[in-house]
Amino acid sequence: MKAVITDHPFPSLDLAKNVFNQNGIEMEALQTKDAETIISHTREADGIMVGMARIDKRVIGSMEQCKIIVRMGVGFDNVDIAAATSRGIVVSNTPDFCTEEVSDHTMALLLMIARRIIQGQKGVREGKWGPTAIEFTSFFRIRGQTLGLFGFGRISRLVAEKARGFKLNCIAFDPYVKKEEMFQYGVEKVEMKELLRRSDYISLHSPLTKETENAFGFEEFRAMKKTGWVINTSRGSVIREDDLITALDQKLIAGAALDVLAKEPPDENHPLIHRENVIVTPHMASWTWDSRDDLQVKGAEEIVRVLKGEKPKNVVNPEVFSK
């Protein structure tokens, strides 16, 4: 049996190799996103681990004996799920490898916004000191403000838990989660219009799907508070970036804190990365030594389960089992 890793962010693959060796699985590591190279190396693979490479219908169609594709990460929009399902290939992801990290990063961005950390640092570098070093417009204490959560999965729930420690009021929009379940986390379920109207901060925690792509555009920003901020640690394309730029230019919202962009890495002259009211971090929210190791091991273990005839823990396309 053979597992192929197409592309990865690790300095070493020793952890994955150890998992495979213990289960009699040969491992081949590539470091490419090139479709032709991937096709030539995965034709006879039994399992695939993929980072950011695109595994489309053509790549999947060339696989002769693949049983599972594991997306190393939470999102799986770079894998053609329908094509995999039609071929009877299980698709899995690793949604729990970075829950703590992304929720921490979300709260860090929120606190940077709420406490005007960037502005304070800028003031010091300009020789200013004391509270008057920053602009006090819409500068209020965190306690009692409202955090709106777009999506209510693992990460969003942990964000809510941490936000409640700062006495933030938490509301959430997610049509797939019942209000009783949200209530258990101290969160009020609301409709989208109410989320936009009431939130001081809106934090995005949805996967990228046809339903969520460009979910936040001009109309959504116009419906937010003028003092509101949008925080995105999910996928860049959940926000229509041109509309965000227009909303910022027209002062429809106060600002944005983004760990993800629609195109990564961005161009040097990207219109969002040099604004004083926009914080951009380099898609780092999920990353610590701990999460990095978890990602590698969890991905390898999913392949082992399927090749041993077991079901993976995190099935993206459960309908494959009814075929």
Image: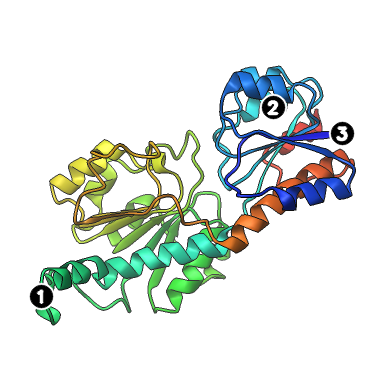
Left or right: 39 with respect to 129?
A: right
* Residue 231 x/y as whole percent: 35, 56
* Residue 94 x/y as whole percent: 65, 49
Give the distance between the C-alpha atoms of the residues marked 1 and 2, in whole angstroms.
58 Å
Q: Is residue 186 above or below residue 301?
A: below
Q: Residues within 10 Å of mark 2 (few under 14, many from 20)?
A: many
Answer with the quarter of the image where residue 68 lies: top right
- Which residue is painted at 90% across and 42% down in the image? 24
Q: Nearer the viewer, residue 294 or 87?
A: 294
- Which residue is painted at 60% across and 48% down in the image? 10
Circle 2 residue: 84
Circle 1 residue: 128
Label number found at residue 44: none
Q: Earlier in the sequence, mark 2 or mark 3?
A: 3
* Residue 85 x/y as whole percent: 71, 28
Q: Secondary structure at mark 3?
A: loop
Q: Earlier in the sequence, mark 1 or mark 2?
A: 2
**Considering the image in quadrants, where does the N terminus appear?**
top right
Three-letter residue code for mark 1: Lys
Q: Earlier in the sequence, mark 3 or mark 1?
A: 3
Answer with the quarter of the image where residue 257 lies: bottom left
Circle 3 residue: 1
Three-letter residue code for mark 2: Ala
Give the distance between the C-alpha atoms of the residues marked 3 and 1, in whole angstroms.
64 Å
Q: Is residue 59 above or below residue 205?
A: above
**Considering the image in quadrants, where does the C terminus appear?**
top right
Of circles 1 and 2, the one toward us is 1
Outermost residue on the bottom side: it is 130
Of circles 2 and 3, the one toward us is 3
Left or right: 273 with respect to 129?
A: right
Q: Residues within 10 Å of mark 3 (few under 14, many from 20)?
A: some
